[in-house]
C-alpha cells in the first residue's frame, strides 16, 4: 500500500533511495544534503534498509567507494552538494567513463568563495561535461519518483551511464509537502534487480577502469555520446512507464506548461519552475498569453525539442541560477545554441545566486520584459535581476 | 604458515608486466599473489603497477582487477569489500589494494585513514620505491634523506631530499588500531609471504608496507635489487616488524648497525654525497634506532 | 612449461560492435612479449643446481619454470635483469649475451 507523508525534499528523495533497494550507500554529509543522508542512516538504524551505509571520510571517497561497489555488481548510491561535488569531480568522470550506473542526488548549492550554503545551480552545472545524466526536479514528489526512475534509466543496457538527480538546496531540500510514498512491491515491479556483465566475477574475471591510449580512446567517448542519444528516448519511456505504476509522470525530458498559444515563455529548471507555474496561471487569468517550459533533463540536453520550436514563440526568457563567468548563463547558452536559426527573441535572466529568493514579482517582471522584447524593444541579452543596485 | 618455495603454486597470476628490469614492485606483487591465489579482486591506483599491467589491450593481471583514481584506492577497495559482503560473494575472496608509496602516504593517506577507521575487510599492500617512480622519479614523503629525485635535484643549493625522516606508515597505521600491520622486504620473501598469509586469515583492515628497490629510480644495476634490499634491512634503514592487535614486534634485529657508505655508494641517487654525509646519515639512523628499540620494547 | 603465453591471436576491435565496453577488458591478455627488454639471458648449470628455488622466487617476472626436472626460463618474458644469477647461492646461473649461444 502506498502511504502519504508530510516530507521535505530531502526526506522524499531518501525514501526514493530506500525503495530503489541499493546495496551500498556511501555518503559524506554536507549542507544542504545532510538531512537526506541522515534519513538514510535512520532507515538503517530502524531496520528498514537493505543497504549498508559506509561512513566515508570525504566526498572523493564517497564516489570512489560507490565505484568500487558498482564494480562488484552492487547498486550504489551517494549524495553531495557544492564543495563536496567539486571534491569528488575527478571520480565523476571515473564512474561515467567506465559506464557504471551509480545514482547520486546533488543538493544544488553555490560554490565558494565566498562561502555560501544556500542554493543555486552553479555546482552541478559546472560538472555538465563529466558524462553524467543530469535531471532537475521541481518538487519533493518528483525527487522521490525521479530517484527511482534514475536507476531504471542508468541501468538500461543501452544507457549504462550514471545519473545525477538535482534538488535545489534549501528551496527544495528543506521545504515540506505532502508526498505519496509508493509501496515497495510496486517499485519492485517497476525496477528489477541490477544485472550487468560490466562487473567483476570469479566465473568471468574482468579488468575494469583500465588505461586506454590514443588508439582506442576516442571510440569509447563516441560510444558514451551514443549512449546519451539512447538516453533521450529512454528517459521519456521510463517516465511514461512509471506513470502506469504510480499515476505520475513528469514529461520525460521536457514539460510544456500552457504553451499552446503563448506569445512569450520562460524556460526554467528546478524548484523555480513551481513558482513560475503560479505566475503563469496568474497572468493567464489576466489574459496574458504566457507559458513555461520546464527542462527536466539537462544532460542529455533536449536540443531537438528546442530546435523544432522554430518561431513558435515571439520571445523566450531563460532563467539561470548560474553564470558561466566571461560568457552567459549556462542554461541560456545551451537553449540559444539549440534555437540557432529561430527568429524567437531570446533573453537570459540570471537570478537566485547564492540562495537569493526568486519571488513571484521577479518572474512577473521577466514576463513583462519578454513582452517588451517581443514588441521590438532592445534590451541587454544577459541580465542580472533581483539585484540590490543597478 | 611455513613457506616452501617448492610447493608454492606454479600458476602465475601476474605475468608479462612492462615493468623495468629488476623491478622490486612487481616482485612484491608477485610474491603476494602466490599466497592470495586466484580468489582475489584487486585494485590499484595510478602507479607503476597499474601503468605496466593494465594498458589496453594488455592485461598482465590474471584475476579481477581495476584501476582507480590516484587518491581513491583505499576508498575503492573499501567499496569493493562492502559490496562483496552485501552481495554474498564467496567469503574466501580477498579484496586487495596495491599502491605505491605516493598513492599511500601522500595523496592516498586520507582515504587509507578512512578505510582503517572503518576497519573494512581489505588487504592494503604499499610497495615502497621511495619516490613517485611512475611519473619519472619525483620525491614522495618516503624519499630518504639527501636522495636525488627530479623534484629534489642536487645543485649548488641542494643536496637532494631535505627531510631527515620519512613518513612512518607503520606507526600511522598502529595509531589507527587496525588488527594487522606489517613491514616487509622483497629481500626477505619468506618473512613477507608469511605476513601476507597471516593477513589473509585476519578480518578487518590489514596494511603491509613492503620495500621495493627500484633500479631505474635509485640508479643501480637491475641484478642488485635483492642485494640492496638486504643491505637496507641489515643497516637498519628499513625494519621488519609487525603489529598484531596492538602488540608490536620487531621481526628482525640486524646484527650490527654498520656504516651506510657501501649502501649509498651503490646508488646513483646518492652519488653526490661525501664522507660527511655518510656519517650524518649513519648518526640519524642510530638516533632513530634508539627510539625504535624503545617502541618495540627492546631498549 | 606452465607459463602464460603471448596472445598471438589478439586482434584489435574492427568496429563499434567489437569495442570493449566502457573501460573494461578481460584478464590475462598478453599481446606482446617482453624479450625485447634484454641483452643477456640466464643459462643454468643443471649439474650444480640444488633446486633451492631462490631464482624462482626472486625473479620479478616469474618466468623461471619449476614444473619439470630441470629449471627452465620462459624466453618470451625474461627481461635479462640478472637477479637470478646474482642471488643463486651456488652460482650456477650465468648471464649470457643473446645470440652467443644457441639457447
Image (tube, rainbow, N blue to C red):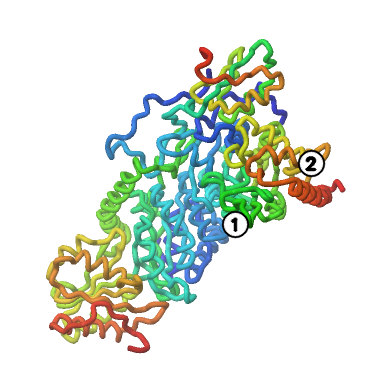
**At 43% from the left edge and 43% from the top edge, which residue is drawn?**
A211
Q: Residue furthest right?
A: B299
Report if residue A170 is visible in the image. yes
Q: Is residue A140 above or below residue B230?
A: below
Query: Which residue occupies the foreground of this view, C69 or A224?
Result: C69
Query: In which quadrant of the rendered image does the C terminus of chain A lie?
Result: bottom left
1 or 2: tag closer to the N-terminus: 1
State the CA–CA distance, disc 1 to disc 2.
36 Å
Q: Name the residue that disc number 2 marks.
A: B259
For residue A170, which numbered disc appears in the image?
none
Q: Name the residue that disc number 1 marks.
A: B110
Q: Is residue A366 above or below residue A27?
A: below
Question: How far across and how far down the image is residue B258, in percent?
Answer: 81, 40
Question: How far across and how far down the image is residue A171, in percent?
Answer: 40, 76
Instruction: Give SS at disc 2.
Output: loop
Question: How far across and how far down the image is residue B222, in percent?
Answer: 60, 32
Report if residue B197 is visible in the image. no
Amino acid at each position: 500500500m502506498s502511504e502519504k507523508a508530510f516530507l521535505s525534499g530531502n526526506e522524499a528523495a531518501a525514501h526514493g533511495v530506500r525503495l530503489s533497494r541499493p546495496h551500498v550507500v556511501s555518503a559524506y554529509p554536507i549542507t544542504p544534503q545532510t538531512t537526506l543522508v541522515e534519513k538514510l542512516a535512520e532507515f538503517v538504524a530502524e531496520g528498514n534498509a537493505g543497504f549498508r551505509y559506509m561512513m566515508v571520510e570525504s566526498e572523493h571517497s564517497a564516489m570512489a567507494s560507490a565505484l568500487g561497489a558498482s564494480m562488484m555488481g552492487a547498486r550504489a548510491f551517494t549524495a553531495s552538494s557544492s564543495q563536496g561535488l567539486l571534491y569528488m569531480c575527478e571520480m565523476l568522470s571515473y564512474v561515467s567513463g567506465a559506464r557504471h550506473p551509480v545514482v547520486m542526488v546533488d543538493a544544488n548549492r553555490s560554490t565558494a568563495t565566498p562561502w555560501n550554503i544556500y542554493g543555486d545551480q552553479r555546482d552541478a552545472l559546472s560538472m555538465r561535461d563529466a558524462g553524467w545524466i543530469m535531471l532537475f526536479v521541481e518538487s519533493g514528489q518528483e525527487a522521490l519518483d525521479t530517484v527511482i526512475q534514475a536507476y531504471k534509466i542508468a541501468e538500461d543496457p543501452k544507457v549504462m551511464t550514471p545519473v545525477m538527480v538535482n534538488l535545489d538546496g534549501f528551496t527544495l531540500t528543506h521545504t515540506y509537502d505532502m508526498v505519496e510514498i509508493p509501496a515497495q512491491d510496486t517499485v519492485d515491479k517497476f525496477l528489477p534487480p541490477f544485472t550487468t556483465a560490466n562487473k567483476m566475477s570469479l566465473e568471468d574475471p574482468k579488468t575494469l577502469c583500465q588505461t586506454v591510449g590514443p588508439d582506442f580512446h576516442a571510440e569509447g567517448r563516441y560510444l558514451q555520446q551514443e549512449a546519451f542519444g539512447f538516453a533521450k528516448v529512454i528517459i521519456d519511456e521510463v517516465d511514461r512507464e512509471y506513470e502506469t505504476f504510480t499515476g505520475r509522470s513528469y514529461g520525460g525530458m521536457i514539460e510544456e506548461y500552457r504553451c499552446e498559444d503563448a506569445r512569450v515563455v520562460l524556460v526554467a529548471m528546478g524548484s523555480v519552475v513551481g513558482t513560475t507555474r503560479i505566475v503563469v496561471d496568474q497572468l493567464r487569468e489576466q489574459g496574458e498569453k504566457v507559458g513555461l517550459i520546464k527542462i527536466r533533463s539537462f544532460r542529455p540536453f533536449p536540443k531537438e525539442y528546442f530546435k523544432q520550436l522554430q518561431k513558435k514563440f515571439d520571445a523566450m526568457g531563460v532563467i539561470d541560477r548560474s553564470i558561466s563567468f566571461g560568457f552567459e548563463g549556462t542554461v541560456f547558452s545551451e537553449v540559444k545554441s539549440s534555437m540557432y536559426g529561430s527568429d524567437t527573441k531570446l533573453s537570459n535572466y540570471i537570478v537566485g545566486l547564492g540562495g537569493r529568493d526568486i519571488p513571484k514579482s521577479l518572474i512577473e517582471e521577466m514576463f513583462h520584459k519578454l513582452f517588451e522584447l517581443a514588441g521590438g524593444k532592445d534590451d541587454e541579452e544577459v541580465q542580472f535581476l533581483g539585484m540590490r543596485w543597478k | 604458515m611455513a613457506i616452501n618455495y617448492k610447493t608454492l603454486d606454479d600458476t602465475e597470476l601476474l605475468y608479462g608486466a612492462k615493468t623495468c628490469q629488476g623491478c622490486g614492485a612487481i616482485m612484491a606483487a608477485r610474491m603476494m599473489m602466490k599466497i592470495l591465489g586466484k580468489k582475489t579482486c584487486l585494485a590499484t591506483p595510478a602507479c607503476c603497477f597499474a601503468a605496466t599491467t593494465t594498458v589496453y589491450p594488455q592485461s598482465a593481471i590474471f584475476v579481477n582487477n581495476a584501476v582507480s583514481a590516484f587518491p581513491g584506492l583505499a576508498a575503492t577497495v573499501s567499496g569493493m569489500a562492502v559490496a562483496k559482503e552485501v552481495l554474498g560473494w564467496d567469503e574466501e575472496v580477498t579484496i586487495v589494494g596495491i599502491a605505491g608509496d605516493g598513492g599511500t602516504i601522500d595523496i592516498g593517506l586520507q582515504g587509507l585513514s578512512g578505510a582503517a577507521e572503518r576497519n573494512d575487510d581489505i588487504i592494503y599492500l604499499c610497495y615502497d620505491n621511495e619516490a613517485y617512480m611512475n611519473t619519472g622519479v619525483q620525491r614522495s614523503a618516503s624519499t630518504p634523506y639527501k636522495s636525488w629525485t627530479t623534484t629534489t635535484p642536487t645543485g649548488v643549493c641542494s643536496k637532494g631530499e631535505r627531510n631527515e625522516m620519512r613518513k612512518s606508515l607503520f606507526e600511522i597505521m598502529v595509531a589507527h588500531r587496525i588488527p594487522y600491520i606489517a613491514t616487509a622486504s622483497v629481500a626477505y620473501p619468506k618473512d613477507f609471504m608469511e605476513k601476507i598469509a597471516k593477513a589473509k586469515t585476519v578480518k578487518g583492515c590489514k596494511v603491509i608496507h613492503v620495500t621495493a628497490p627500484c633500479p631505474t629510480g635509485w640508479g643501480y644495476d637491475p641484478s642488485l635489487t635483492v642485494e640492496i634490499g638486504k643491505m637496507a634491512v641489515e643497516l637498519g634503514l628499513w625494519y621488519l616488524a609487525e603489529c598484531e592487535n596492538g602488540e608490536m614486534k620487531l621481526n628482525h634485529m640486524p646484527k650490527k648497525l654498520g656504516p651506510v657508505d657501501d649502501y649509498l655508494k651503490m646508488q646513483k641517487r646518492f652519488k653526490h654525497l661525501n664522507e660527511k654525509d655518510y656519517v650524518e646519515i649513519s648518526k640519524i639512523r642510530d638516533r632513530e634506532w634508539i627510539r625504535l628499540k624503545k617502541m618495540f620494547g627492546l631498549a | 612449461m606452465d607459463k602464460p603465453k603471448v596472445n598471438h591471436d589478439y586482434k584489435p576491435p574492427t568496429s563499434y560492435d567489437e569495442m570493449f565496453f566502457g573501460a573494461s577488458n578481460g584478464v590475462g591478455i598478453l599481446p606482446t612479449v617482453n624479450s625485447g627488454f634484454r641483452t643477456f639471458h640466464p643459462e643454468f648449470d643443471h649439474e650444480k643446481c640444488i633446486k633451492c628455488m631462490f631464482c624462482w622466487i626472486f625473479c620479478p617476472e616469474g618466468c623461471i619454470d619449476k614444473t619439470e626436472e630441470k629449471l627452465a626460463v620462459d624466453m618470451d618474458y625474461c627481461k635479462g635483469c640478472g637477479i637470478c644469477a646474482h642471488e643463486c647461492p651456488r652460482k650456477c646461473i650465468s648471464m649470457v649475451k643473446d645470440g652467443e649461444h644457441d639457447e
